[in-house]
Amino acid sequence: MGRRILNDALRTIVNAEKRGKASVELKPVSTVMSSFLRIMKEKGLTFLLVLLSSGPFGNCNVYVCTGYIKNYQVHDPHRVGRITVDLQGRVNDCKALTYRQDLKAKEIDQYTERTLPTRQWGYVVVTTPDGILDHEEAIKRNGGGQVLGFFY
């Protein structure tokens, strides 16, 4: 049951993205899930979106988009709780591995090449002694661990 919580939450995010939903509610809450969502919020391409409106004043709106999700809020984490995730429409697929494969620091690069569609897209999330990190940070710190899942 414990390892399926993250998998069910990530599948809910993917299904909501495919339906074009603006937000999704995830139940129950786990600390691993909130750490995974933190990485999804922080990582990703950063780009500027400039909207020009024609009119007498010529307003210009600039938006900075980062990460795969906009924001998430944890409600009542000490009980069953729930997490509300604001989506951006950038998640193509995300999965959690239920068997938690062990990886050494040298093997992380090979695993990402096998799992992710290209080198530019996506992240593999790894549990290390330093905490839950994405594959780039784990390679920088030269630490191996267990694979939690991936998203792109």
Image (tube, rainbow, N blue to C red):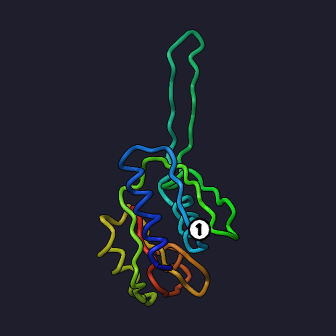
Tag 1's secondary structure?
Answer: loop
Task: From the top left corner, tell me how far across and down residue 100 is, in percent.
Answer: 42, 84
Residue furthest to the top: 56
| Image label count | 1
Q: Which is nearer the eye, 89 or 116?
A: 89
Please name whichever residue, 98 or 76, is drawn nearer the observer in this view of the structure.
76
Asked whether, in this view, residue 73 is left or right of residue 143, the answer is right
Which residue shows up at 35% across the image and 80% down it?
Answer: 111
Q: Is residue 128 above or below residue 25?
A: below
Q: Residue 74's image quarter? A: bottom right
Tell which residue pokes out farthest to the front in this image: 80
Residue linked to disc 1? 29
Residue at image location 38% in from the left, 86% down from the top: 107
For the point 56% across and 67% down, the residue is 28
42 relative to 136, above or below: above
Image quadrant containing the C terminus: bottom left
Q: Quadrant of residue 80?
A: bottom right
Residue 17 drawn at (x, y percent)? 40, 50
Residue 75 on image: x %, y %: 67, 59
Q: Nearer the viewer, residue 30 or 114?
A: 30
